[in-house]
Each structure stands twice: as structure tokens, then as C-alpha cells.
């Protein structure tokens, strides 16, 4: 395996590649460290090896913390069954770009994953590692999409699963979780309450909580989004990425993916500017960015963007540092702007995203309007979830014209209204 050990992000103490997530010495988060000496040093050969892999995230297995079997002819990852994520479309969005006065905008549509959000990437990696470590039960604390993905992966792999969600989650996300036969627990409280409860449970049970004790492995799954973007752009880096921020894990790991491939010579050039996107109703990272703080003040979320509603983001300080050092920013938009963002993306690209994608699109629009984006930049907009999961957000935003099934009714009634 390419991963060599876990390391504390703060004090650099090393740990074995077990189900550990917090440093005994300083309580800092643990992160996977790799030893890529075994990889081909010839860039062309390394690229060919990636391109010869399966059409899913396992083509990037050399850069993930998994053991797996030896390389085989039909994809080296025969042992990694389940619900393959990744290889989602990267679409050049010229109509959206034109509307915003930009030259080159690409939409990475991660709603096109098995359970319709980017969470399948992180859950696939965490669940595979959990199996390697001998766990028979997976679990999570979720704002919604993680619940869908953990329940589905449990079903696909024949593992028991426990899913903990805030009791007031969107109905679509609850239904699209329970159907997989998981043990679904609604907790009266916010996501941060759910997370606290699960952290306590984690110490009591022999379960693999994908985003708690398996978090170092989970987080690595997000790097595959960066790898795919670079590969789909013909082994080139974008100039800027706009990414939603909940805990800040996705945001920081996309940047880490680009860096890792640049260090290995697979990519060249300056690293992209990283722009984080939050909802005003839960914007601890955007507020700290605006105020020039290094840490985030926890907030109590109140926004339609429930999948991003983490009031106390674990990777907040790292997200702030990344936004500053990359020349990006973290911005927040109102619920009204989120709805407008959903409509803008739908009407210029044909992609219907959930509220998190409305946040991201609205932040891109805000950056363009503010003149923060050079017109020649190549920008990637990361869309992380599916619109059918948050239908309430768009209810009542347009009209259906109802008529009798006759030409006359069409001509005399609706036609005037529609055409005028
Ligand atoms: C979980 C999630 C995110 C971001 O999560 P992080 O905790 O910041 O990694 C973004 N969009 C959607 C739709 C999500 O479900
Ligand atoms: Zn430490």
C-alpha cells in the first residue's frame, strides 16, 4: 500500500494505519502520509497506469490508503467490490460563463454518483478501509448525503449500518436512506449534537464511523475529485476552484490532491486559487475569513443548505489557511441567492443541483460580479449533490399552466400568457 502511516497534522506524531483520528498528545487531527517511492518515476508511464484503471475512483488506488490485492490485468482492484463512485462528468459550461462575463467555466457534476452526491467517494474509501481493518458494522453522523451513501454501501457490501441524522432533515434524504435497510436514527438536535453523540458512541462500540474514527481514510476519498478534474482537463490544473464548505474536508482535500500530483510530476504549474462557499445561515468559515481570524467561532445553523449545516467545522482553520495562501477566499450567500443559484445552473447547463450546489453557483456569481475573477481564468465549479433531494427549495418558484386538452384552450388561455 502507498500509505505509510498516520500523522498528527499539528505535532507530527506518527501512528499506525488503524481506526484512529485524534492525536493522544495534542488532540490534533490525524492524516494519512504516503510513501510514493514505489511508483513509476516516468510520468508517461504513471499516466498510462492510471488511464488503464477502472472507470471509477479505484483508478486512483495508488494514491489512496488501501491495501487491496496485487495489480492484475483487469484493474488491480478486484478485491474492492461494492458501489463504485467517481468518473463523473466535467462539462464546459459556456452559457453559464457568458452569463457571468467569464471565459472558461467547467462544471464538475458529482451528483452523478451512485447515491447522487460526492459523499460516495469518501464512503467508498472509508468503508473499504473499514473492511480491511475487520469491521462488520459501519456508521456515520450525517447532514443527509452521507446517510444515503453509508446506507447504500452497507447494503452493497453486506455490512450492518447505523445512520444518525438530525430529526428535521429533508424528507427526500430520509426516504433515500431508509430504503437501503439501514438502522436509521433521527436525533432531536442539530448536526453538531448528532456528531457529539456519535463521538461518544464511537468510544463504546466496535463500529467504523466513517467520518469519526475512520475520518483520516474518509477524507482521502475527496482527493479523487481533484485527480479526476486534472485528468479530464488533459493533465492540466484549473486556475480556480469554487467548492462548498461544511466541515472543510472536501475543500482542503481537493487542494491536497492537486498538490500531490504536482509533487509527483503528473501536473505542472501554479496551484489553483481555492474559493470556499457557505450559506449565510451557517457561515463560520466565511465569517472568520472576513474578520481575518485563524479559527472559527461555532454557530447554530439556520439555512436551507442543510447538507452544509455544520456549525463547528473540524477543518475550519485549515480551510481558512488554504483560502488565504492560495489567493482565494471563503464567501457566504443568502437563502434567496441559493435559490437563484440553483435556477441559474439549471437554466444555463441543464444540471439540477441541491441547495449546496446553489450555494456554490451563487458564490461563483458573486465573485464574477465583484470582479474577483480574471476573465481569462479557467474556473471549475464543484457541484456536489442532486436537486431531487431538496425539492422544497424550489417549490413555488415557477408556474405550471393547466389547460383543457383542446387546441382552443391552448390558443385562448395559456398561449397568450406563455408567449407574452
Ligand atoms: C458533505 C457535503 C459537502 C462538503 O462537506 P465537507 O464536510 O466540507 O467535506 C458539500 N456538498 C454536499 C452536497 C455535501 O453533502
Ligand atoms: Zn499531535
Image: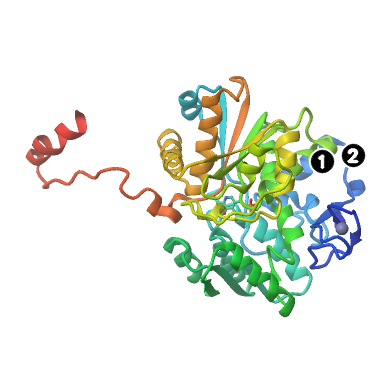
Image point (45%, 56%), residue name:
389
The location of residue 350, given as percent across then percent down, is 43, 39
The label on residue 261 is none
Ligand 2: which quarter? bottom right
Image point (48%, 52%), residue name:
303
The residue that label 2 is drawn on is 41
Image point (83%, 59%), residue name:
70
Residue 168, above or below 405: below
Task: Inspect this view and state whether residue 78 appears.
Answer: no
The residue that label 1 is drawn on is 46
Residue nearest the viewer, comparing 76 with 264: 264
Q: Residues within 10 Å of mark 2 (few under 14, many from 20)?
A: few
Residue nearest the viewer, comparing 276 with 415: 276
User: Label 1 near label 2: C-beta < 8 Å?
Assistant: yes
Of labels 2 and 1, earlier in sequence is 2
The location of residue 38, given as percent across then percent down, is 91, 49
Residue nearest the viewer, comparing 395 with 159: 395
Residue nearest the viewer, comparing 306 with 157: 306
Image point (19%, 28%), residue name:
420
Q: Residues within 10 Å of mark 1 (few under 14, many from 20)?
A: some
Residue 314 falls in which quadrant of the image? bottom right
The answer to whether 132 appears left or right of 337 in the picture is right
Marks 2/1: CA–CA distance? 7 Å
The answer to whether 181 appears left or right of 262 in the picture is left
- In the rendered view, how is the structure colored? rainbow
Residue 272 falls in which quadrant of the image? top right
The location of residue 187, given as percent across then percent down, is 53, 72
Residue 20 falls in which quadrant of the image? bottom right
The location of residue 404, given as percent across then percent down, is 11, 47
Q: Which quadrant is home to the N terminus?
A: bottom right
Amino acid at each position: 500500500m502507498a500509505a505509510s502511516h498516520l500523522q498528527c497534522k499539528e505535532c507530527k506524531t506518527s501512528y499506525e494505519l488503524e481506526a484512529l483520528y485524534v492525536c493522544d498528545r495534542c488532540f490534533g487531527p490525524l492524516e494519512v502520509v504516503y510513501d510514493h517511492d514505489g511508483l513509476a518515476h516516468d510520468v508517461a508511464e504513471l499516466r498510462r497506469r492510471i488511464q488503464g484503471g477502472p472507470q471509477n475512483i479505484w483508478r486512483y488506488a495508488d494514491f489512496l490508503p488501501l491495501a487491496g490485492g496485487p495489480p492484475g490485468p483487469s484493474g488491480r482492484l478486484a478485491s474492492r467490490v461494492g458501489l463504485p463512485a467517481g468518473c463523473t462528468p466535467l462539462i464546459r459550461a459556456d452559457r453559464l460563463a457568458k452569463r457571468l462575463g467569464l471565459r472558461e467555466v467547467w462544471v464538475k457534476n458529482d451528483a452523478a454518483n451512485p447515491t447522487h452526491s460526492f459523499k460516495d467517494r469518501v464512503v467508498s474509501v472509508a468503508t473499504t478501509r473499514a473492511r480491511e481493518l475487520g469491521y462488520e458494522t459501519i456508521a456515520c453522523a450525517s447532514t443527509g448525503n452521507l446517510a444515503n451513501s453509508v446506507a447504500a454501501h452497507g447494503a452493497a457490501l453486506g455490512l450492518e449500518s447505523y445512520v444518525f441524522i438530525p430529526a428535521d432533515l429533508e424528507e427526500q434524504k430520509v426516504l433515500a436512506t431508509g430504503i437501503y435497510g439501514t438502522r436509521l436514527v433521527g436525533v432531536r438536535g442539530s448536526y453538531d449534537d448528532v456528531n457529539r453523540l456519535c463521538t461518544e458512541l464511537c468510544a463504546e462500540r466496535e463500529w467504523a464511523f466513517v467520518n469519526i474514527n475512520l475520518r483520516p481514510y474518509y477524507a482521502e476519498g475527496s482527493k479523487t475529485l481533484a485527480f479526476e478534474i486534472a485528468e479530464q482537463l488533459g493533465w492540466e490544473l484549473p486556475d480556480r476552484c469554487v467548492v462548498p464548505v461544511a466541515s472543510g474536508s472536501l475543500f482542503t482535500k481537493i487542494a491536497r490532491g492537486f498538490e500531490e500530483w504536482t509533487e509527483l510530476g503528473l501536473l505542472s504549474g501554479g496551484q489553483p486559487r481555492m474559493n470556499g462557499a457557505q450559506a449565510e445561515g451557517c457561515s463560520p468559515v466565511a465569517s472568520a475569513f472576513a474578520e481575518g481570524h485563524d479559527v472559527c467561532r461555532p454557530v447554530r445553523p439556520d439555512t436551507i443548505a442543510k447538507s452544509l449545516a455544520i456549525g463547528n467545522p473540524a477543518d475550519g482553520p485549515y480551510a481558512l489557511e488554504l483560502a488565504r495562501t492560495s489567493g482565494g477566499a471563503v464567501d457566504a450567500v443568502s437563502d434567496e441567492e441559493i435559490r437563484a443559484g440553483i435556477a441559474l445552473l439549471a437554466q444555463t447547463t441543464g444540471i439540477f443541483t441541491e441547495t449546496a450546489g446553489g450555494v456554490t453557483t451563487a458564490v461563483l456569481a458573486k465573485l464574477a460580479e465583484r470582479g474577483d475573477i480574471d476573465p481569462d481564468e479557467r474556473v471549475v465549479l464543484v457541484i456536489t449533490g442532486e436537486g431531487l433531494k431538496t425539492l422544497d427549495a424550489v417549490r413555488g418558484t415557477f408556474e405550471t399552466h393547466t389547460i383543457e386538452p383542446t387546441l382552443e384552450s391552448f390558443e385562448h388561455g395559456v398561449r397568450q400568457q406563455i408567449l407574452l
